[in-house]
Image (spheres, rainbow, N blue to C red):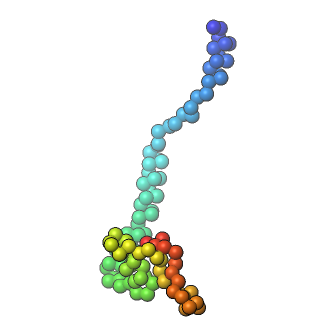
Amino acid sequence: MTTTEQVSVDAGERSEPVRRPPTRLTFWLFLASIVIAIVPIAVATTRAIHDGWIPTGDNALFAIRARDLFTHNLPLLGSWSSASLNTSTQLNHPGPLYF
């Protein structure tokens, strides 16, 4: 096999894209995004516990229904809808998607 034949055979082969290992910058950006996502939730939870937050209104309903998720009282319907006031039947939002 001559050199030109070898080059044409090599050129016809498909090579897989080269995958470089993640760099330190990639790791630190990933870590920073996790921290940025968790900090607001942690701050809100800490403030609620510290201030003695008591859920009222819709927040109370969401809290009660969310606690029912891992019990035998699993909510099969969503929250009550104020559209029930305009109709003669009780309406709920579709499913426990909120929880």
**Residue found farthest to the top:** 1
Give the x, y percent position of residue 19.
52, 36
Give the x, y percent position of residue 58.
45, 84
Residue in front for this viewpoint, 19 or 91: 91
Figure quadrant of the C terminus: bottom left
Give the x, y percent position of residue 32.
44, 57
**Residue 98 in sight:** no
> Residue at coordinates 44% horizontally, 74% vertically from top-left?
76
> Residue at coordinates 56% horizontally, 32% vertically from top-left?
16
Decide: is 17 above or below 23.
Answer: above
Figure quadrant of the N terminus: top right
**Residue found farthest to the front:** 89
Decide: is 56 above or below 95.
Answer: below
In screen coordinates, is 86 left or right of 53? right
Decide: is 68 above or below 7.
Answer: below
In screen coordinates, is 91 left or right of 54? right
Residue in front for this viewpoint, 31 or 68: 68
Residue in front for this viewpoint, 32 or 72: 72
Give the x, y percent position of residue 31.
42, 54
Location of residue 34 by image quarter:
bottom left
Decide: is 57 above or below 93.
Answer: below
Location of residue 9 by image quarter:
top right
- What is the number of callouts on the image? 0
> Residue at coordinates 65% horizontally, 11% vertically from top-left?
3
**Residue 40 in sight:** yes
